[in-house]
Image (spheres, rainbow, N blue to C red):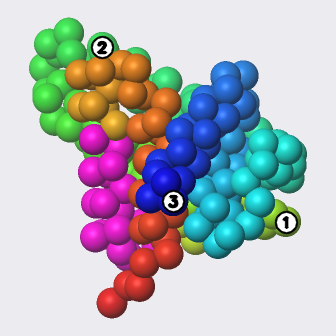
């Protein structure tokens, strides 16, 4: 039974993150609280729903502005991809650049969420995550592969979206906790 406990916590974290992220402006704080929830389980700390919402509240200062910026950046990139997909001249090169930018942004956001801790300032957390994402290509590739698995699995079976979000959070935490070198 203990072997399924981490999977159960990933399912819980995925569900709670999706519920909290519905207003969009709470996307980054929800991801941070979800990663903190997974870390709490691994460290033997409380994983009560009440504790999750306390983590969300502590991640909100500065986190909601970051969420708006992240959502706006993804929206611009998505519009660019749709427009360029219409067959504009040189669109293939720009589509590749937009796709790479979106992937890089997703990796930095997830690595930021995985390293956030209560009381940390989001600006410093994001700068450090961006630095680590660039310096640790192997770890960034692992996070990107976790996102790829999320896309493929939920494309095949949409009902698995909720537990897969939790698994991506777990992957981000594992990447940040692994020894580098």
Q: Tell me the residue at 85%/65% (across/down).
A: 119
Q: Are marks 3 and 2 in contact (CB under 8 Å)?
A: no
The correct choice, above or below, for 86 with respect to 118 in the image is above
Residue 54 x, y percent position in the rendering:
86, 49
Q: Tell me the residue at 68%/41% (across/down).
A: 30
Return the residue found at the far front: 1
- Residue position for label 3: 2
Which mark is in front, 2 or 1? Answer: 1
Magenta span includes 134: yes
Q: Tell me the residue at 31%/60% (across/down).
A: 142
Task: Check disc 2: other Cα within 10 Å, few if <14, some if 14-19, many if 20+.
Answer: few
The correct choice, above or below, for 82 with respect to 2 in the image is above
Q: Say the numbered circle drawn on residue 146.
A: none
Q: Earlier in the sequence, mark 2 or mark 1?
A: 2
Residue 35 x, y percent position in the rendering:
60, 55
Provide the residue span drawn in magenta: 131-149
Q: Is residue 63 left or right of residue 151?
A: right
- Residue position for label 2: 83
In depth, the one of 56 and 43 nearer the eye is 43
Q: For the stretch drawn in magenta, what is the main secondary structure?
A: helix
Residue 27 x, y percent position in the rendering:
65, 36
In depth, the one of 61 and 21 nearer the eye is 21
Per the image, label 3 sits on a secondary structure element best described as: helix
Q: Is residue 11 left or right of residue 62?
A: left
Q: Earlier in the sequence, mark 3 or mark 2?
A: 3
Q: CA distance from mark 1 to mark 3?
A: 32 Å
- Residue position for label 1: 119
């Amino acid at each position: 039974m203990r072997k399924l406990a981490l999977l159960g916590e990933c399912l819980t974290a995925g569900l709670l993150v999706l519920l909290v992220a519905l207003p969009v402006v709470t996307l980054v704080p929800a991801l941070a609280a979800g990663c903190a929830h997974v870390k709490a389980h691994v460290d033997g700390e409380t994983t009560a729903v009440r504790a999750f919402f306390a983590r969300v509240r502590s991640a909100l200062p500065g986190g909601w502005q970051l969420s708006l910026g992240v959502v706006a950046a993804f929206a611009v990139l998505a519009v660019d991809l749709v427009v360029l997909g219409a067959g504009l001249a040189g669109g293939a090169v720009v589509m590749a650049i937009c796709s790479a930018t979106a992937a890089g942004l997703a990796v930095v956001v997830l690595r930021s969420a995985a390293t956030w801790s209560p009381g940390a300032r989001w600006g410093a957390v994001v700068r450090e995550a961006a630095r680590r994402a660039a310096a640790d290509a192997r770890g960034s590739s692992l996070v990107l592969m976790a996102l790829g698995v999320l896309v493929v699995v939920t494309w095949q079976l949409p009902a698995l979206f909720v537990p897969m979000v939790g698994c991506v959070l777990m992957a981000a935490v594992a990447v940040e906790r692994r020894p580098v070198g």
